[in-house]
Each structure stands twice: as structure tokens, then as C-alpha cells.
């Protein structure tokens, strides 16, 4: 079953696989089963994906969310502030994550070997257990380009490298955390023609949070690019959404966004209305594929969505997006 998740090409296939994954997780994940039992929901009653219960993301902080009897091979943790409880994503089959981000990148951007991948992710590099670092490190290796690599505090070297690569016409992907990209454009002014700037969200307490449009205006002016790309990912997901500009994200075919009523979390609301973001990530086959996040947003069209902010009183944590 899990082998065909990444072969989905139609909404009907997605629905069929999602219902199968729900049944698998209901039967094999004791925490999710208990949650469904409390709601009096059983797979035999479910015929549509919007009827499937979405597990509140906070459960990844308080429980072991696993749908497999295999041993844990990797534990991804959220950054969290000092003293706060972090989320843990227990991974029994790392190949699902690798296949998800590899095929996800290819789906949106093409062959990774066409790019020089530069990473400016200081807050992630300085701790263990980051799923983002795992992904970017592997993408750097998969690029097979000796110019690819991580940068921490050597911003002079990075600025020089960006200009040099851009001038010789190399396709470059610079992926960075928001505060570090802002630091870079405050020190240097660029006019890049062949470079994609991709922010992963989050100020990590280093700067005042900005709304996305304000952040992107500063970054696009500073780097001299027309659009700023974004990645929507989190510790609890093994798939990512990508935006090529204007804050509109698209999902790979095995991931889907729904929105729930902010007053009634069990009710799914129509496209175009703002609500809580629910994610179906079928790559989460061995944990939980149906997650109610703390993000607010709206679904725009088939598999595209916007993030507008976060619920009040929710803790600011890794991979969060700009709050309003």
C-alpha cells in the first residue's frame, strides 16, 4: 500500500488511498484509535475524506504517534523555545520521508542535479533532530554539485558565492530561515537573475514576526528577484507544500489541505473561507496522516492554499509561518 502513495495522479486515487490509510492507522495506531473512538467514528462509516477525524497536532508533544510495530529509526523534533515541550515525530521507515521530499522537489522544480543548493539555516544547524536539516542535507548531496553546501555565520563567503554563481548563469536555490535571509540583505545588496530564494518561515525569536507580504517585499528588494518562494513544512509532516510567490502554496499529489471551522473543529468548511488548516499527508503512513494544525488559512483551488496566521495562544514553534 505505502509503495503506491507516490504514484497518485488523480483526486479519485487520492481519495481511495486516503480511506485505506485511515483504516490502516485506525487499526494500528492506539492513540489515533482512541481519538476516533471518543468521536464515535469507525472506518466502516467513512466514505469521504472530509469525514475522517483530524488529530490535533499537539498530540505529537504528549503521545507517541506511531502506526507501525517496526522499531523507530529516526526521531524528528521541533525547535521549541527553552523549557517548552517539543513535538516528536517518530519515524519507522525513513525511506518514506526521502521519497516524499525527493519526488516533491522534482514535482515542483525538476531535477535536483540542475541546481546548486545553498542553505542558510543557522537555528536549525545548531540543534539536533531537525527534519528540515535532514532534507536539505540530502538535497545538497543529491545535487552532486561541489558548490552546494550549508552556511552558518560565514555570510561574506555566501554573498560572494551567490554573486559568482549567478554571474556565470548557474541555477541556484538558496533556502533559508527568514531572520537569516533578512540579516543577509541588510548587509549586502544583490541583483540575482538565476537564483531562487526560498524562505522556510520563522524568526525563531531573533526578530519581530512580519506578515508574509512584508517579509517578501524586503527580501525581493534585497536579493533583486521578482518573487520569493516558500516551503510549508513541519516536524509532524513528511511532505512539504511549496509556493513560487505571492504566498500561494501547492501540494504534491499525495498531500491535501482542508480547512475546518474555527468554532467547530469537526466541521470542514468550503474553499475560499478562512479556517484552521487540516493536512492530509499520506507519506505519514506509519504515524498519522490526518492532522489538525494550529495554522489559519484558506483553500483556494485544487490543492492550493494560503496561510494567513496562527491561532491565538498557540505556542510559536519551529517552521511556523508569519503571524498577523
Image: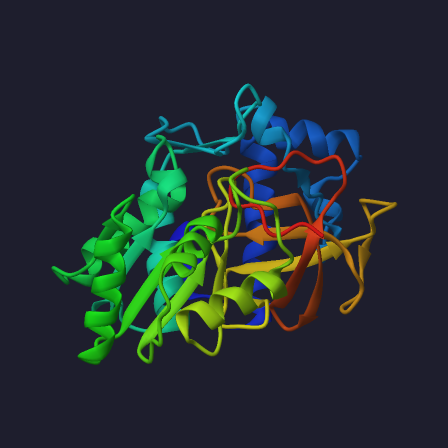
- Identified at 15% across, 61% down, the residue is 147
- Identified at 62% across, 27% down, the residue is 31
31 vs 192: above or below = above
Q: Nearer the viewer, residue 321 or 62?
A: 321
The spot of residue 35 in percent (x, y) is: 70, 31
28 vs 112: above or below = above
The spot of residue 26 in percent (x, y) is: 61, 37
Relative to residue 21, is residue 302 drawn left or right? Answer: right
Relative to residue 76, is residue 264 drawn left or right? Answer: right
Q: Nearer the viewer, residue 251 or 139?
A: 139
Q: Residue furthest top?
A: 83
Q: Nearer the viewer, residue 291 or 58?
A: 58
Q: Nearer the viewer, residue 200 or 302?
A: 200
Q: Residue furthest front?
A: 187
The spot of residue 141 in percent (x, y) is: 19, 54
Relative to residue 2, is residue 304 drawn left or right? Answer: right
Q: Is residue 247 visible?
A: yes
Q: Residue furthest right?
A: 263
The spot of residue 237 in percent (x, y) is: 50, 45
- Identified at 33% across, 80% down, the residue is 193
Rendering quarter of residue 272 = bottom right
Q: How many marks?
A: 0
Amino acid at each position: 500500500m505505502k509503495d503506491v502513495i507516490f504514484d497518485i495522479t488523480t483526486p479519485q486515487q487520492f481519495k481511495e488511498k486516503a480511506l485505506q490509510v485511515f483504516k490502516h492507522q485506525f487499526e494500528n495506531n492506539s492513540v489515533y484509535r482512541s481519538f476516533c473512538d471518543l468521536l464515535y467514528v469507525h472506518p466502516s462509516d467513512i466514505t469521504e475524506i472530509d469525514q475522517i477525524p483530524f488529530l490535533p497536532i499537539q498530540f505529537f508533544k504528549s503521545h507517541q504517534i506511531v502506526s507501525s510495530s517496526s522499531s523507530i529509526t529516526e526521531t524528528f523534533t521541533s525547535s521549541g523555545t527553552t523549557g517548552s515541550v517539543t513535538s516528536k515525530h517518530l519515524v519507522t521507515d525513513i525511506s518514506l520521508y526521502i521519497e516524499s521530499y525527493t519526488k516533491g522537489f522534482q514535482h515542483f522544480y525538476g531535477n535536483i542535479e540542475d541546481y546548486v543548493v545553498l542553505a542558510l539555516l543557522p537555528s536549525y544547524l545548531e540543534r539536533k533532530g531537525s527534519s528540515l536539516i535532514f532534507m536539505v542535507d540530502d538535497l545538497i548531496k543529491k545535487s552532486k554539485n561541489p558548490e552546494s553546501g550549508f552556511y552558518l555565520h560565514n555570510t561574506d563567503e555566501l554573498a560572494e558565492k551567490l554573486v559568482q554563481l549567478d554571474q556565470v548563469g548557474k541555477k541556484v536555490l538558496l533556502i533559508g530561515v527568514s531572520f537569516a535571509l533578512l540579516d543577509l540583505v541588510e548587509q549586502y545588496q544583490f541583483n540575482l537573475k538565476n537564483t531562487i530564494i526560498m524562505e522556510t518561515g520563522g524568526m525563531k525569536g531573533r526578530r519581530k514576526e512580519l506578515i508574509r507580504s512584508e517579509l517578501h517585499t524586503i527580501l525581493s528588494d534585497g536579493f533583486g528577484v521578482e518573487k520569493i518562494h516558500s516551503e510549508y513544512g513541519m516536524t509532524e509532516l513528511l511532505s512539504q507544500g511549496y509556493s513560487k510567490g505571492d504566498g500561494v502554496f501547492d501540494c504534491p499529489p499525495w498531500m491535501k489541505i482542508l480547512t475546518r471551522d474555527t468554532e467547530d473543529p469537526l466541521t470542514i468548511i468550503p474553499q475560499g473561507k478562512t479556517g484552521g488548516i487540516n493536512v492530509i499527508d499520506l507519506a505519514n503512513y506509519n504515524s498519522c496522516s490526518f492532522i489538525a494544525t494550529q495554522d489559519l488559512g484558506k483553500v483556494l483551488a485544487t490543492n492550493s492554499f494560503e496561510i494567513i496566521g496562527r491561532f491565538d495562544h498557540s505556542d510559536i514553534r519551529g517552521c511556523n509561518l508569519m503571524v498577523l
